[in-house]
Structures are given as C-alpha cells and as structure tokens.
Image (cartoon, grey):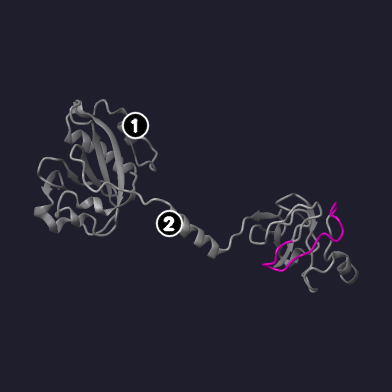
C-alpha cells in the first residue's frame, strides 16, 4: 500500500500500488489528486525536487494546489499544514483508503490502545445501574423463557411457582425442575398504588444471567433480583405468552383499561424494555 496525504486538506490516504498515476478524489475535501508512486527519498523533501528525479506521474500535485505544499509523511508522522494555511490533523485523526476503480473512501482512525483507555475511563465515570433489590409486594412477576412462561410470583405467601404443563407447582418443593441455564427475562407487572382501585398500569422487563439464575427461586422470593444483568426485552412469542398469562391470572377488571400495556405487548417493537 502507498500512504500519502491530500495536499489541500491533509487527510491521511492510502492506495494500492496498481493505481499509481491514476486520478482520484479526496473523500474529505473532494480535491482531484494523482496517486503518487511509493516514496524512496527522505520524509519532508520538497515536491519540486522529487519532480526532477522521478517520472512525471510519480508525485504529481493536483490542479489548484500550491507547489511545494505537498509533503507525503511516513506512517505515524504528523501531516504538514495545507497551502491555505489551515491546520492539518495528526495522522491518528484522519485516514482514507483508495480502492482500485472506485472513488476514495475515508474513515476516522483511532489508536486501539487509546480507544480502550477512553472506553474504560468512560465506564468509570458512568454511574452503575441500580436494579431493584426486592420484589415489589404490590406487583406481580413472571419469568419468560424463549417461548413461554416458566415461573410466576404473586404476594400470596406461596413463593415462586413453576409452570408445569397446565399446572403451577411450587419451586421450593420441585428444586430438581429448576433450569440451571438459559435465556430468561424477568417481567414485572406493575399495579396501581395501595389505596387506589387495583389496576394494571405498567410493565418492565429485566434480562437475567444465563447461568444459575432460576436456581435461586427455591431460596426465597427476592433472590432472583440479584440475577438481573440489564434491562430486557420480549420477543414475539414471549409477548404472546405474557398476554395469555395476564388474562389467565387476573380478573378482567384489573387489566381491561391497561391500554399502554396492551399496546406494548401487541407492538412489533422487540427492543423496548417496557412502559408505565
């Protein structure tokens, strides 16, 4: 590959050797330029001097560029200012690729080590999410597998219940049926505050750890909250399963006016974590 700089804007460019001498456009400023031959002289030598010892097409200056303003630096060296006097970014800040038979395509370049360091620093500055540590005793909870409901909790003293065919069985008394791994979503069905008419008013989804999450269901009501890893979402089958579970578990009067919840469960948007 041949590496050189746009004489007008200083963009860092690269091209295949088989298109030396051909004209391409700089992707940054649109200036027409001739792809130069590989450099054999020292960095920073004057363009006019190279013209005297190189073929006419080797390091041509595009039309409109000032003579002597085009210096092709080696990789890692800062680019010289353009003829217009505008400051040119460092080589790490701009890069471009010249493809054979196509227009020049440019993209921003970044040092991988710098990128990793910046990402780690940003993570340290961001506050860690605070997931709920306990089940809200006013609400109800479902756990969805990929295609169906696998467990449910209501504040009725029975603890977590597992779905077994058409029946519900106790998680505590059926520990051997708790799955050890899988993709599970904890669904919180939010109800109106105590003192108000009980109504379904919202829904929120949380993604659970893929391993050992459901093995906590026999250890207490709240242990599952420690297995939340991030906000979750529901696929088409899971939304259908939640709709069915709501209608089977609760009286019609509790969910008939939950328009936001039904819109969420009927929507084809499978990336939102909930409403309300």
Q: Residue furthest front?
A: 125
Is label 1 in a helix, a strand or a loop? helix
Disc number lying in front (2 or 1): 2
**Of callouts 2 and 1, the N-terminal one:** 2
Q: Which residue is mark 2?
A: 124
Q: Residue at coordinates 76% horizontally, 65% vertically from top-left?
A: 72
Is label 2 in a helix, a strand or a loop? helix
Q: Which residues are magenta?
A: 63-79
Give coordinates of residue 206: x percent, y percent. Answer: 30, 47
Inspect the magenta stretch and tell me whether residue 75 lies in it. Answer: yes
In depth, the one of 9 and 105 nearer the eye is 9
Identify the image quadrant of residue 271: top left
Identify the image quadrant of residue 192: top left
Q: Which residue is mark 1?
A: 263
Q: Residue at coordinates 82% horizontally, 69% vertically from top-left?
A: 45
**What crowding class fits label 1: few (fewer than 14 Cα within 10 Å), some (14-19), or many (20 or more)?**
few
């Amino acid at each position: 590959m041949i590496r050189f700089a746009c004489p007008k804007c200083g963009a860092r460019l690269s091209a295949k050797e088989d298109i030396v001498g051909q004209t391409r456009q700089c992707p940054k400023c649109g200036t027409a330029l001739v792809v130069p031959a590989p450099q054999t002289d020292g960095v920073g030598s004057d363009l006019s001097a190279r013209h005297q010892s190189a073929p006419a097409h080797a390091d041509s200056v595009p039309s409109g560029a000032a003579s002597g303003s085009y210096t092709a630096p080696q990789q890692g060296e800062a680019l010289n200012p353009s003829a217009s006097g505008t400051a040119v970014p460092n080589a790490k800040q701009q890069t471009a690729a010249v493809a054979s038979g196509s227009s020049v395509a440019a993209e921003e370049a970044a040092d991988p080590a710098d990128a990793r360091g910046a990402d780690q620093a940003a993570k340290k500055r961001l506050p860690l999410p605070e997931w709920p540590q306990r089940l809200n005793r006013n609400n109800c909870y479902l756990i969805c597998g990929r295609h169906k409901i696998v467990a449910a909790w209501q504040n009725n003293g029975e603890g977590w219940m597992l779905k077994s065919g058409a029946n519900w069985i106790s998680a505590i008394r059926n520990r051997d049926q708790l799955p050890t791994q899988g993709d599970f979503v904890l669904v919180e069905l939010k109800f109106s505050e105590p003192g108000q008419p009980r109504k379904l008013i919202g829904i929120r989804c949380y993604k659970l750890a893929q391993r050992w999450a459901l093995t906590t269901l026999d250890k207490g009501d709240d242990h599952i909250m420690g297995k939340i890893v991030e906000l979750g979402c529901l696929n088409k089958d899971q939304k259908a399963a939640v709709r069915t579970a709501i209608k089977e578990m609760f009286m019609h009067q509790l969910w008939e006016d939950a328009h936001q919840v039904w819109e969420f469960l009927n929507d084809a948007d499978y990336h939102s974590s909930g409403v309300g």
